[in-house]
Amino acid sequence: MTVMSRRNLFAHAARFAAGITVFAAAPACAFSPLPALPTRSMPATEARIAWLRLLPDGRVRLLLPRQEMGQGVSVALRQIVAEELEVELERIEVVLPDTAAIAPVKSTVGSDSVKDFAEPVARAAALLREHLRHGGHAAEIIDRGQPVTLRSLQPDVAHRHVGQARPTEQIAAIVTGAPAVYAGDIRLPGMMFGLVLPAGATVAAGDDNVRLVDLPDGRRGLLSAHPGPLHARAAGIERARTPKPMPAMDVDVAQARGRLEHRLRNDSVNAAAGWTLDRRYDIPFAAHAAIEPRTAVARWRPDDPVRLEVWTGTQDAFFVRETLARQFGLSVDSVLVHSCRIGGGFGARTIVRAELEAALLAQVAGHPVKVQWTRAAEFIDGFHRPPSSHRIRARLDNDGRITDWWHGFCSGHVIFTSAAMPRWMQAVTGFVKDPGVARGAMPPYAAARMRVEFSDIRLPVDTGPWRGLGAGPNGYAIESAIDELASIAGQDPLQFRLANLDPQHGRLRACLERVAQLADWTGAKAGGTGRGIACGIYKDTSYAAVIADVTVGADGAVRVTRLYCAQDSGRIINPDQVRAQIEGNLLWGLGMVLTERLPIEDGRVAAYTFADSPIPTMDAMPAIDIALIEPPGAMPAGAGETAMVAVAAIGNAIAAATGRRLTVLPYRPA
Amino acid sequence: MLLTINGREADIPDARAGDPLLWVLRETLGLTGTKFGCGQGLCGACTVHLDGAAIRSCQISAGDAAGHSIVTIEGLVGETLHPVQQAWIAESVPQCGYCQAGQIMAAVALLRETPKPDDAAIDAAMAGNLCRCGTYQRIRKAIHRAAGQPS
């Protein structure tokens, strides 16, 4: 057996006319035991996933087991492969694979991508490296758990790629407006343009060659050879206006009816004695508001084994494939889904809407059809972050330690979204706690007795996963309450947190100390300017602390002037992409406090444009300082949703500046 | 009907004259770099230049754009990338990237009017271009970089 030098590693590859395929082992979590959405059936038993291919010309193709929506997973996994193979980044070609190219993997959600896929991808690359180095002749390599050194994840070695800042994949295509990056860029011969009318909607007639058609599922749609007339007609869609009863999202009403449904912790708190703090927090509906509307292109191919072909930006291409196959009575192999870069995901692209609509319309049209939702449809026919209502009661001892903590809350559904569940299943899930609502509800503080409980309430407006799920709302309530407790105890909010943190959360302590240093924290300033701090843990593995500076104008208008964040998401593959995720999170926190509230009237969404449901604009963006903490030996954790705690930091800064606690989001001048 | 796009003349069927320029660019001419975000002139994803000024291509008909010089994101590239495009890469601006063609077109128009904008001028000029990923801080830095001044 020859052992190849690094330089010869890829010269050797030329011997393989068909290249070498590496079948990576699926990470333990690739097939979620609890599917992210209940309608999603479990993938079959394919446990091996072809993710890596050495091409005869010596390049290596990485078939991404994830979707790209700007979170940077493509470049991070590419860096890992280049590191393992000891080659330049340019040698690695990254492909968003279609559903025929790899075996099913779970949806791209929950900041899981680097956390769960770094290691299997590194193993695949390392196995290829060792195979080449030892002059192996196999055309296929299968990861059977054989021992192999993962250079990319070793803590104490010098890395060429891992730990380096690299821009997102496709950046050159993005800044030049190159073709075929997003689903809407796909153009097929004979393609038509279509939209499906929401149930109960009507549309005015027109002399514009836009056809009103009946769809096989009972809905109606519009079809046109050109998008201009189609969208002009769509502007005249009149949706049903019958009022729908909207249940009160009121934790006090829910608690008055009896016990809340689900308990995350059920210590017996002493409810008879007085509380140090008894405070309610209310959070409204909010939209995802990705700039790319839901988009898909579908083509039927009657004489081909692949009967239906779809292009889409989705967080779960396999769920799309399965849903379409079921809908049209096809085998999954005869449905092919091409993944395109997503123009903003944030949880909104987890169910199947535009894809099915494009396929239905294409069937009726006898042509390929492109569907691009209108902005009004994005607001009205999409699903949204549910409103929630929280009551936190807490008691301090004489030393300012929390002895009792009781957080009761109610919320619309998140994981058990009505947007993707049949009615019978919605009834069944009433007995199961929605893990999305529960996310982030356990405080990182030590208290002798804790009771954390909630009810989820089925709403007439569809709700579902929104960046961070419950972590944003729960973090806001918890960290606002902690801040007020510090104030009541007469303690500095940083010191109060450090004193009350559960000792097991040393990494969160380190974030608090680091952000305090970064911001030169000396306490919450008051009188016109204010400073607030907050911290939190995301999914038990990622830690962040944020400090916000705000000024309040004479008219009560709040301006966030600066945000500081220290975050520990474990091992960092690409610090620039982690920073970008944090920047985005901080702005989402800012939007949650100052801007976002999806208006609802008569149990229906009442927003048609960005003017009706605004999101933060550039003038709202403060200067941002970020410190990344990377404990030696830590494995990568999710980075995309931890810094949502900014919402509470900003709220606490407003309280410091105005003396008024922000208990209803978003902030409105008194 | 003739449109002047990126320095070239494009012949458009007269039937498309009433359509928003955005759709004619994207689907009649295949210039898909200009994005559809809202169709209501409120997000900026469809920003192009009309005689050098940044406009929302969803808010002007193709017919009304005839006789004017239209430049799209595809027309910015010359021998090399435009300095603003280069700055976008150097500052690693995009996340999902969907709004960025519009952001770049708005930034190029801003720098033509105001070669050395301060943060306030940048915010004022760019506030109509929405980014949901949160790249605003990097956009500011990239504009300063393209202007040849420290951010």
Image (cartoon, coloured by chain):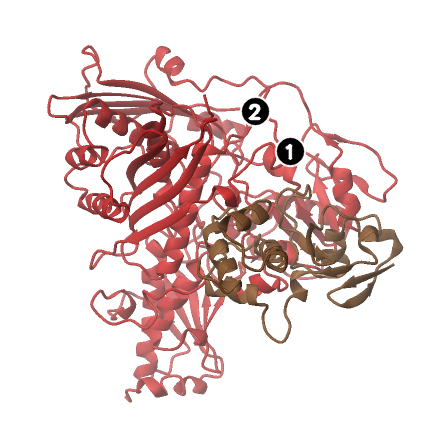
Chain colours: A red, B brown
Q: In this view, does A230 lie above or below A393?
A: below
**Which quadrant of the view contains residue A540?**
top left
> Is A649 on the left-hand or right-hand side of A616?
left
- Residue A470 rendering spot, x and y as whole percentages: 38, 34
In the rendered view, tell whether residue A540 sits above or below residue A175: above
The chain holding disc 1 is A
- x, y (%) of residue A479? 30, 32
Which element type, helix, strand or loop, lies under badge 2? strand
In percent of width and height, residue A274 lies at: 20, 12
Identified by mark 1, the residue type is Tyr
* Horizontal and vertical percent position of residue A406: 25, 22
Residue underneath mark 1: A608
**Above or below — where is A319 with respect to A661?**
below
Q: Which of the image's four quarters has the C terminus of chain A? A: top left
Relative to A110, B61 lies left or right:
right
On the image, numbered disc 2 is attached to which residue?
A600
Picture residue at 31% right of the left edge, 29% below the top: A480
Q: Is mark 1 on a helix, strand or loop?
A: loop
Res. B101 visible in picture: yes
Three-letter code for the amino acid on which mark 2 is drawn: Ile
Chain for disc number 2:
A
Between A480 and A475, the one lying in front of the other is: A480
Crowding at label 1, few (<14), some or many (≥20) Cα neighbours within 10 Å? some
